[in-house]
Image (cartoon, rainbow, N blue to C red):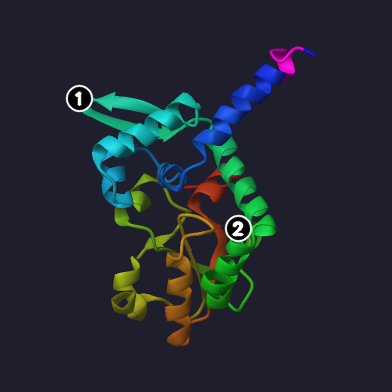
Amino acid sequence: MSSNGPKQRVFSHLAEIAAALGHPHRLEILELIAQGERGVEDLAGRIGLSVANTSRHLQVLRRARLAEPRRAGKRMFYSLISETDVIALLAALGRVGERNVAEIERIMTTYFHSKDGLEAVSREVLLERLHGGTVTLLDVRPADEFALGRLPGAINVQLDRLDAALAGLTTDHAVVAYCRGPYCLLSFEAVAKLRLHGIEAYRLEDGYPEWKAAGLPVEG
């Protein structure tokens, strides 16, 4: 059988995509640009890498057709290609990892599940509560990410400003907090703090990118 047949060529290209995902910094970059288009310098600052190193990671993602650039003067901005498919790919990678890798399971138990003793709110339940007007929605991402896109009616309060915002949160409705995605601890920490103050609070099961990829309504 030819080693260069159609199936083998397809597998070769799929392997290139898999290789592009095979670095933690590139996965973090994908999580960040899933929130919206980001500049190279901004990405470098958030991840803690040099601009040159960040650019090299972005080039790998670009060659794998996972991210695409846009030039604005001397600056380069990146966004996801086929946003819905890339987010679904990352979600599938996470599910396989949580199921098959013992260390990931330990991390999930220690840092995620232990911080949230109650079930997370699904997208379907949250949408129903939004339609019924029975929920206060809290976006705890940075303000610039909130400006790029958010769930309808969400209030943006960063974690370090949550104490000051408590007085303005109604106790008539439950609060649902969300952030960047399923591995973003901001929403877990927000829910824990709200519960300490006697507020009925939950987290969304994932984050803004997954909500948007599901075709649900967004603002911004």
Mark 2: secondary structure:
helix
What x and y, as percent, mark residue 63? 46, 24
Q: Say left or right for 80 vs 117.
A: left
- Dot 1, crowdedness within 10 Å: few (<14), some or many (≥20)? few
Label 2 near label 1: C-beta < 8 Å?
A: no
* Type of amino acid at the residue the image marks with label 2: Leu
Residue 129 at what x, y percent from top left? 60, 65
Residue depicted at x 61% and y 47%? 93
Main secondary structure type of the part rendered in magenta: loop
Q: Which mark is residue 127?
A: 2
Look at the image and say whether residue 189 sits in the magenta stretch: no
Kindly identify which residue carries mark 1: 73
Return the residue nearer the eye: 160 or 200: 160
Callout in the foreground (1, 2): 1
Q: In this orientation, does residue 133 appear?
A: no
Compare residues 74 and 214 and report the one nearer the observer. 74
- Residue range in magenta is 2-7
In the displayed structure image, the side of residue 132 where residue 30 appears, left or right? left
Numbered label attached to residue 166: none
| Residue 53 sits in quarter | top left
Q: Which residue is drawn at 33% across and 26% down?
A: 70
Front-lying residue, 211 or 74: 74
